[in-house]
Image: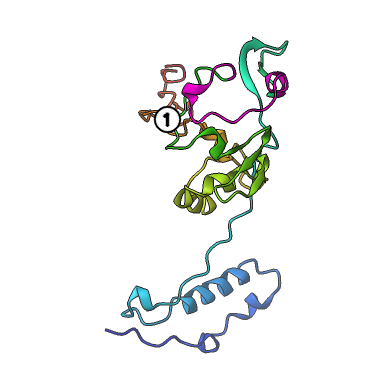
Amino acid sequence: MRTPPCTPLFLYPAPPRCWASSAWPTRPVLGLLCLAHAAGCGDRDQPLALRPALDATPVASATIHHPDKLSGVPTDKRDSLGRPIRAACVTCHSLRRPEALPASAAELDEFHVGLRFEHGGLSCASCHVIGDQDTLRKADGEILPMRDAMQLCAQCHGPQLRDYAKGAHGGMSGHYAGGARVRNHCVDCHDPHVPAFQPSTPVLPPRDRFVGGHAAGTGEGAHR
């Protein structure tokens, strides 16, 4: 059964004289209701696939964490504020002339001994430039600065980059709904040498003291 055609807006009964006053607060509401009624008109029997698509809501842009250089190697030391101290790469790499990068972690005899390397069949030279630890190398030989490391990841992880661009992959840092948004970089969550996540089990959300917290008249539920 087809729906009747829409009634033009100018055929609606005229509002009472008292509504003509600019002080009447609901005049904008009436206009919105009329527009909503007009927008709902159409052929309800028409398949959804043939109906005109609605414009997608634009997504606010976000700032992405881009590492400008390697952050160094973590140590077991902490500074006066309790933050872990990291040793800069040049602390060790400046002591000897650059050599050919090893093909696997098993060949590391001085620097990064014991490094786990489980990233497909790649070697150190697959991503790093010999003699310049802050520069990366793509498979086609193109040299990339460290801040463009995401392009290096995208060579093999195209589907993940696509989902990341659409917001379905990659976590958001804390932000307000109406404020600036900051997104994580690939290496914020994935170790480049061992990118796979360890198996984990989801847990229940934290207990909120305002949602089913205090039982009426008992004072219970706040600190369980």
Front residue (pair 99, 217) = 99
Task: Name the spot of residue 20 as percent of width and height, x first.
Answer: 66, 78
* Kind of element beneath mark 1: loop
| Residue behind mark 1 | 205
Relative to 202, 168 lies left or right: right
Q: Which residue is drawn at 44% across and 85% down?
A: 6
**Quarter occupied by the N terminus:** bottom left
Q: List x then y, in percent, for residue 13.
A: 52, 85
How was this image coloured?
A: rainbow
Camera-nearest residue between 151 and 59: 151
Residue 125 sits above or below residue 87 on the image: below
Q: Quadrant of residue 92?
A: top right
Return the x and y of residue 96 as percentages of the image width and height.
70, 20
User: Residue at left 51%, top 85%?
Assistant: 12
Span colored in magenta: 90-111
Q: Residue at x 71, y 23 (%)?
A: 90
